Amino acid sequence: MTEMTAVRRSRITPEREAELYAAVLDLLREVGYDALTMDAVAARTRSSKATLYRQWGGKAELVVRAVRHGKPGKLEGTDTGTLRGDLHALTSREDDCTMEQNSALMRGLAMAMHSNPDLRQAFREQLIEPEMAEFKRLLQRAVDRGEIRPDCPALDFVVHMLAGGFVVRALIEDQPPTQDFLRSYIDAVVLPALGVPTTS
Amino acid sequence: MTEMTAVRRSRITPEREAELYAAVLDLLREVGYDALTMDAVAARTRSSKATLYRQWGGKAELVVRAVRHGKPGKLEGTDTGTLRGDLHALTSREDDCTMEQNSALMRGLAMAMHSNPDLRQAFREQLIEPEMAEFKRLLQRAVDRGEIRPDCPALDFVVHMLAGGFVVRALIEDQPPTQDFLRSYIDAVVLPALGVPTTS
């Protein structure tokens, strides 16, 4: 969080903020992004619309902030000592049921991003870029440990591989990406592409 | 094409059918799936709605049939003698400009599938399953040639890998999946995961 947003938000307590984000996620699950209005958020959370706009700037920012706040674990704290351990740990940040719910929510948001450039931008700046930076550090540690060769061309595509597992599983196979599925996928695809033995 | 659909469609000429599919794709690009009506298709193609319903059954089937007809090349005819050659050949079925247009169209349809189970079903039955079957034959040939080990676990995930390249490129990086990008991705990710040397 930047200093500026910290200042902007200084007048609400963390508890109040958490309550508000939870209400936004509930509304998102109920009506979807396009039908979600700041009026509905204001009513549900007993806030004024003016407050919402002052604190978050707009619907896209508020939604992305709520998604970011609702994320169960931190990539940041993950450091098991092996790449395989780290990647597997990422899949256990959520139980399968939560993962299915969140996966439906995220698919809905991905659809909404298609027609809402402001949502796409907020998502990229607030969520994807910070996660990607953290993910790069995780991969760099594997390079530093000698697990991945520094010139391995698949290093540029780790997020593509992982996202493919999610998307195809959800859209084409119509199944939620369970922890078992994701671990098999990591072992079968991601680690071999990176030249890392899966029996480590 | 099943015998039944061949019979059902016997009264229109291939030229007329091609014209009609082209009009459906134009309309799709103009208004998107949700706003596309059979009325609009009938008006644009000077057909009666009754004919459209009799020949195709409904909007989802008509759209999927049009997409299938508009596909530039056939996976079926691809057999270069190496897996790398086959996969690279798949990326050259379209030039980059057509690929960008089609990729926008397909993303729009993927979004529409989210909320239209009938479109999802038609898409799966008419397009994905036949292509997957053909794709499996392509991979099986590589196994038969000894390029891929028959027990290679990544064999189950080739479509996931490829789709990841497309989706992340389009949604997160906001760039069209060009031929150059796809070929780098195939060489960096798909072939190494399958244990195939990329210098072949």
Image: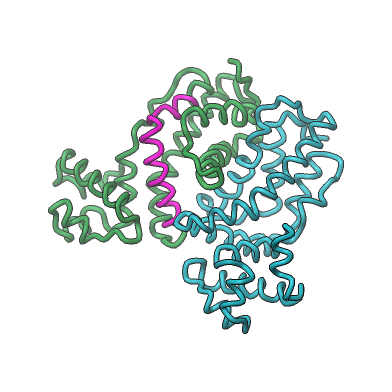
Chain colours: A cyan, B green
Extent of the magenta region: B88-113
Q: Residue A58: in sight, yes or no?
A: yes
Residue at image x 59%, y 55%?
A123
The location of residue B34, given as percent across then percent down, is 35, 60
The location of residue B175, given as percent across then percent down, is 49, 40
Q: Nearer the viewer, residue B30 or A187?
A: B30
Residue at image x 72%, y 77%?
A16
Residue A60 falls left or right of residue B46: right
Residue A136 falls left or right of residue B173: right
Q: Which quadrant, please, contains the C terminus of chain B? A: top right
Say if A13 sits above or below B113 in the image: below
Say if B175 sits above or below B47 in the image: above
Where is residue A142, by image quadrant? top right
Residue at image x 81%, y 37%?
A141
The residue sitting at the top extreme is B200
- Can residue B96 be found in the magenta stretch? yes
The location of residue A97, given as percent across then percent down, is 67, 64
The residue sitting at the right extreme is A81
Say if A79 sits above or below A150 in the image: below
Q: Nearer the viewer, residue B86 or A156?
A: A156
Residue at image x 54%, y 60%?
A109
Residue B108 falls left or right of residue A151: left
